Image (tube, coloured by chain):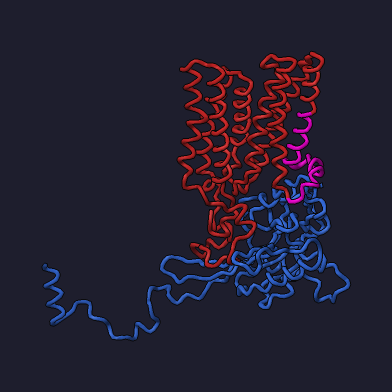
Amino acid sequence: MTALPQTTAKKLGLVIDLDICVGCHACVINCKEWNTSNYGAPLSDQDAYGANPSGTFLNRIHTYEVKKPQKPAQIVHFPKSCLHCEDAPCVTVCPTGASYKRSEDGIVLVNESDCIGCGLCAWACPYGARELDAAEGVMKKCTLCVDRIYNENIPEIDREPACVRTCPANARHFGDFADPESDVSQMSAARGGMELMPEQGTKPVNRYLPPRPKADIHTDGDINILAPFLEPVAATPKGLLGWLDKALEAL
Amino acid sequence: MHPAASVIIFTSLSGLGFGLLFFLGLDRPVVSGWVAFTFFLIAYALAVGGLLASTFHLGNPQRAMKAFSQWRTSWLSREGVVSVATLLVMGLYAALLIFADIRIAPLGWLGSALCIATVYCTSMIYGQLKTVPRWNMSTTPALFILYSLAGGALLSAQLPFALFAIVILTAIQILSWARGDMSFSQAGHTIETATGLGALGKVRLLEAPHSGENYLTREMVHVIGRKHGQKLRVITTLCLGIIPVAMLLFFPVNHFSVVLIIILHVIGLFVSRWLFFAEAEHVVGLYYDKR
């Protein structure tokens, strides 16, 4: 049924630390690798080696430049995957019941054998978390690696989403947001973890940790911290330059 | 949003078909026998043709029957259920009228009410989406129903009502363009709220996640053709409103002029429906720094 569960026992999700992410795209690659070769339809590519390649990805990294007037720009790498919203609009619009949110852990999944590929759930998602696979005609989305996190056939250390497992900078963390004592809850509380587009009312589970403020040596307007030790520059020119200045002013 | 031919044909034709069925259910025009058969044939061809067109954009149309199951939450599912109920009720009404010359008026009224309900469900597939502020307005269902009623009135030659419906439709169409132009900024979505980085300064995309297009940008970040938006709005207003109203008020009405008005109406309908999709901006475009 595409009705959302009233509450979920767990709220599994990710913390993504925008201060740490270096934009290496390793999570994109490991996500694609795991999810194309395990649960569900593969993540196909079209024209992969041609002039206009495109393909299905469940996780993509945008890179933004953030700038305040008169300040140097700051670069923020921004990984984006399904936020496993509590009020997931993608679930309720589904006409077939293929999209659902699990009451036990809150993961939003697609039952691919029920999906007709109408694309309405992708329209309903504000975050661009769902992509219709061009080869299979079914909707693909982040499963929070549901086939890893409970998988007793793999070593315990690997029982977390592929993107988290592979991140070389430790910018991604996986855990239960319903438990206030969990690492992700604590981390989010300590660093002001934020929701994306809160005005959409989707109540996303995933949290983004904002970049820490940069040390700012330019706050008092000096270009160079050594400037106070330099010879003062003459405000009014003298001699030939002074004469030229006056002559040009008079023209 | 990408203005796919399948959804434009689906919403336009099925709206016309259910509009005509609405009037046939109210016994307007009063028809029986082969004339009634012809009217119902046209209405069913439009309604069913439109509904079939909607299956062309499905990734797996062979599973379309499953779409009747989630009417509790999904407007798309409701649209499927209500449209089939409408076609069945009107089919029974039409069969009795054509082949037995029996007119069961309450059955026709029920069918007419279901026609409006179907068009309302169609409109809410789009109107429910908070992600597309231009669609997420009360004018969306009003527009779809008025397009259906005006088109149905013209096809069933109910000219006084058609004139009335066309005037209101044109007014609501212009209002919805005007409100739609402000809807995105009024909803308060910006690249800063999308990324949560607004406190750090002005945000712009430095590098996209990938060098080419993807499903999201093809489907939801459609920017081609908007530069002609104003011209197309004028064309719509002329074809849909001003010329038909002038013809109905100031020129002698005959079969030829009614056919001409219907052709103009359908042109206006298709152009405005193309604009409905092409001008709609999805909030996911913010992540790509495009709208």
Q: Nearer the viewer, residue B194 or B149?
A: B149
Q: Quadrant of the C terminus of chain A?
A: bottom left
Any idea which chain is the blue one in this picture? A
Query: Which image quadrant for residue A41?
Result: bottom right
Query: Which image quadrant for residue B106?
Result: top right
Magenta run includes residue B80: yes
Q: Which region is colored magenta?
A: B59-87
Farthest residue in the right direction?
Answer: A153
Q: Name the residue: 47% across, 22% down.
A: B246
Any idea which chain is the red one in this picture? B
Q: Nearer the viewer, residue B129 or B217?
A: B217
Q: Is residue A89 visible?
A: no
Q: Is residue B181 above or below residue A174?
A: above
Q: Position of residue B10 (x, y in %)?
A: 67, 38
Q: Is residue B106 above or below residue B197?
A: above
Q: Nearer the viewer, residue B99 or B152?
A: B99
Q: Is residue B204 above or below residue B171?
A: below
Q: Name the residue: 42% across, 75% down.
A: A218
